Image (cartoon, helix red, strand yellow):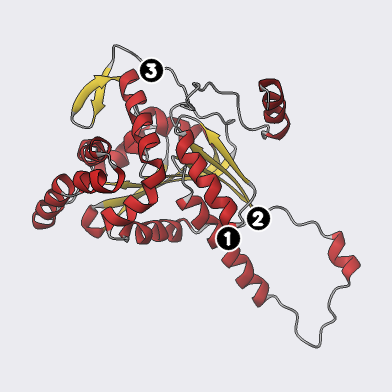
Amino acid sequence: MNSALCRLRLRLFTPSYIRRCQSTSSGHAKAEYSSSKETHFGYENVSEEQKAHKVHGVFENVASNYDLMNDLMSGGIHRLWKDCFISRLQPRPNTRLLDVAGGTGDITFRYIQHILHKRNRDSHVRMPSSNMAAPSDKEENTVEEPPLYEIAVCDISQGMLDVGRKRAESLGYSGIIWVCGDAQQLPFEDDHFDCYTIAFGIRNVVDVEKALSEAYRVLKPGGRFMCLEFSQVNNSGVKWLYDKYSFNIIPAMGQVVAGDWKSYQYLVESIRKFPDQETFKEMIEDVGFRRVTYENLTFGVVAIHSGFKI
């Protein structure tokens, strides 16, 4: 397919609430980063520009083995964490979700499953009794129901998005927009989404405050921010075991299963560089969110943070 036809298809099928954004030929969503301002990439000090490229490289490298490695590294517990995350969110039909850093679709698919389950349960409860006349086909056809959900998945890595899109096709889920974009410069209009989710992604952005500000911008008044992220373990005994496992087992597992030690070494280090639960809560409040709370899971190995745009 030639480039002109590709551009035409994008204009025809991209929703109006998605802004035009830059991307590189490799599929890396491109935002403006400083080549002189310093930040960290795990325990390594690098420029903002270097970190953006390094993080993109990590997730391009791990995309094909991402779900398998999550199962192996956590013993499958990551599935329970994500189930709990969606349970706390309590998705409702006819809402707009933006799932950031959600390339492989784990959160999006759980969101859809929750809505479909709720719809089926409600339909069963509202089913007319046998002595009530059922509506005619004509009456049924005159009622046009709104879509159950409107979902945009945004990820910096096209490789991760490709994995998620294939999974959605295999599960039979449609109505999902897959966007290669940067959490610090979201390609969406202001005040559009009812809910913003980000799971195991915000610690990888170059500037967390900018990502939080963007989350606030794209949410409607009353919209909810939900973040699932690795955090700080407070129990000293559990922390010792967790650190030993993280630094000695996870990179080695990445090398054996995915042929990639460095990416998984970075993932372990990035967890230790991320702010603790209280500090992150304050950062969320500083950009304008209110009623900010957090809940520790598995001794604080991960935490769910929640806030509202009010």
Q: Amino acid at mark 2?
A: Leu
The furthest residue to the top? 36
Residue 69 coordinates in the image, percent (x, y): 32, 50
Q: Estimate the x, y position of residue 118 in percent, counting from the top left.
A: 58, 66
From this viewpoint, is residue 309 visible? no
Report the disc number at residue 33: 3
Q: Is 102 left or right of 189, judged from the image as shown? A: left
Check whether the beta carbons of the residues at disc 1 and disc 2 lie within 8 A of each other.
Answer: yes
**Residues packed near mark 2 inside 10 Å, few (<14), some (14 to 19) or many (20 plus):** some
Please state the horizontal and vertical placement of residue 137, each as a whole percent of the image: 88, 69
Q: Is residue 177 above or below residue 123?
A: above
Q: Is residue 192 left or right of residue 53?
A: right
Q: Which residue is tagged 1?
A: 115
Quadrant in the rendering for residue 16: top right
Instruction: Name the N-terminal-most of marks 3 and 2.
Output: 3
- x%, y% of residue 49? 34, 18
Task: Please state which of residues 195 and 18 is positioned toward the viewer in this rendering.
Answer: 18
Nearer the observer, 136 or 89? 136
User: In this view of the protein, can residue 37 be seen by the observer?
Assistant: yes
Disc 3 residue crowd, few under 14, some 14–19, many 20+, Cα 10 Å: some
Q: Residue at x 36, y 25 (%)?
A: 52
Q: Amino acid at mark 1?
A: Ile
Which of the marked residues, 1 or 2, is nearer the chain's N terminus?
1
N-terminal-most mark, 3 or 1: 3
Secondary structure at numbered mark 3: loop
Q: Secondary structure at mark 1?
A: helix
Quarter placement of the N terminus: top right
Q: Is residue 40 above or below residue 238?
A: above
Q: Is residue 4 left or right of residue 48?
A: right
